[in-house]
Image (spheres, helix red, strand yellow):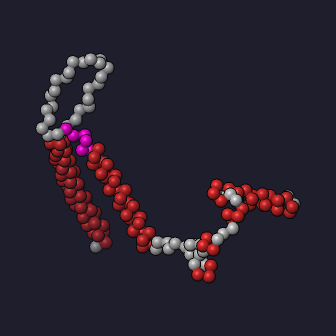
Amino acid sequence: MDILTRSILLYLVSFIVVCLHLTPNSAHPKDLVTSPSQHEDSTRGKRGFVVTKNKPGPIRQVFGIVYEQWNDTRFTLNSISKLFNEQFLPENASLTTTPAPATNVSTRAPPYRITRSELIRILRRNIKGLARLYNIELKDALKQSEITRKQFRANVTKEVAKFL
């Protein structure tokens, strides 16, 4: 492109940008002339320097990130807690109910829900089983380490005896 085509294109682009930025209230050319009160822009400080908003410092940014993380974690835990609490029946709820006569044959039975005491009983039984398993594994590991220690000691004695 030659220089004339570039300058015409630049002129057209700048004209379109100016036209797009005009609001409907300021469509008249005499509205484009600024009054003295409009001339003082709030973004200009003394002597025409551009005044920018103070950016938060690094400490505030770090604490902002920590606060956002804490807030997200708190919200997530509250949501999970709410969902978890909705899954339990009340303690005094009856477990056996007689179903109403079926008017709609395609209905499904509601999902099985347990009470908190049942859940605690199941968890306690599982934890006791895991503790028993841990103790068995620990005893086996200690027994095996004692055997390994004795074998190591015997091997060291053999190797040292060769040099004596």
Residue at 14%, 35% in the rendered image: 93
Q: In the current view of this chain or complex, which residue is farthest to the left?
A: 92
The quadrant in which residue 33 appears is: bottom right
Q: Quadrant of the C terminus?
A: bottom left
Residue 147 in view of the camera: no
Q: Residue at x 29, y 17 (%)?
A: 105
- Image check: 61 left or right of 24? left
Q: Considering the image in quadrants, where does the N terminus appear?
A: bottom right
Residue 97 place in picture, x, y as percent: 16, 27
Residue 71 picture location, percent across and down = 35, 59
Residue 88 on the magenta segment: yes
Q: Residue at x 32, y 20 (%)?
A: 106
Q: Residue 16 is drawn in which quadrant?
A: bottom right
- Name the foreground residue: 120 vs 126: 120
Q: Is residue 163 left or right of residue 51?
A: left
- Please report the bounds of the magenta region as a residue range: 84-89
Camera sees residue 3: yes
Q: Is residue 57 left or right of residue 113?
A: right
113 vs 6: above or below: above
Q: Nearer the viewer, residue 123 or 151?
A: 123
Q: How many marks?
A: 0
**Placement of 36 over or under 85, stated as above or below:** below
Who's the residue at 34% across and 56% down the image?
73
In the depicted structure, whether residue 55 falls above or below residue 6 = below
- Horizontal arrangement in the rendering, residue 127 relative to residue 27 (left or right): left
